Amino acid sequence: FLVRVNCVKETPASPDPEFLETGTVIRTATATFVNAEMLFMNYDEPGVIPASQSGGTYMHAEPELIDELKWMGVDMVSTANNHSLDYSFGGLRANLRWLEKAGVVAAGTGENLAEARAPHYLDTPGGRVALIADASTFADFNPASPQRPDMRGRPGLDPLHVAMTYDVPSAAFQQLQQIRTQLGLRGRPDAEQLRIG
């Protein structure tokens, strides 16, 4: 199912004091960044088609809503997240074009792995701020790939691969070893580690 994002502007009809106070704090910061958990794009842009898999739902926002982020004080956005390729490579490219056009610094995605991993900078009165963004939750087709002299890289996000390790009490570990044996799974019975999954 599709989600459309609408932001709230400061208007006489909706003067929420807590919201406005939060906005003041954000606007007065030297630099503010957010994770843009959607793609700024229009459905009729070249190459914008829904991918075979989304980050849970297909996230999209009209490009005009970037002005809402800027009004709120957002200077920089991470584009690396589970929605980076909801609308395939065309959606990723459209998102980056709209952010650049609006003057918002974006990091975390690109035409290849080097671009996706590259820092992007914001010059402020307080100094230069760098943003490097990555994602640890994504579909298999979302990571960018390296570019080689003989082959262009694949557009995508900067992946952060995470491996979880659990320390369990000895009795629980022995039970897990017994379950592995009962299921006929491979592994040394005297191993100090057990891989599950």
Image (tube, rainbow, N blue to C red):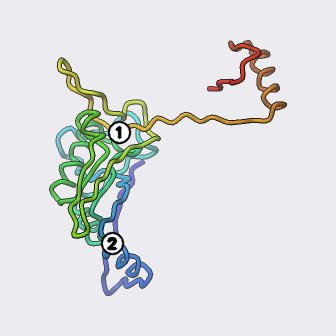
Residue named by callout 2: 29
Q: Classify 140 as above or below 26.
A: above
Q: Nearer the viewer, mark 2 or mark 1?
A: 2
Q: Classify 107 as above or below 110.
A: below
Q: Could you classify mark 2 by the number of other residues whose Cα lies within 10 Å: few (under 14), some (14-19), or many (20 or more)?
A: few
**x and y percent of residue 6 in the render?**
34, 65
Residue named by callout 1: 158
| In the image: residue 34, left or right of residue 164 | left
> Which residue is found at the position 29% from the left and 33% from the top?
113
| In the image: residue 78, left or right of residue 190 | left
> Which residue is found at the position 17% from the left and 20% from the top?
149
| In the image: residue 64, left or right of residue 13 | left
In what element is the residue under mark 2?
loop
Give the spatial CA distance, label 2 vs label 1. 27 Å
> Which residue is found at the position 30% from the left and 82% from the top?
11
In what element is the residue under mark 1?
loop
Q: Amino acid at mark 2?
A: Ala
**x and y percent of residue 103 in the render?**
18, 60
Q: Classify 102 as above or below 71.
A: above
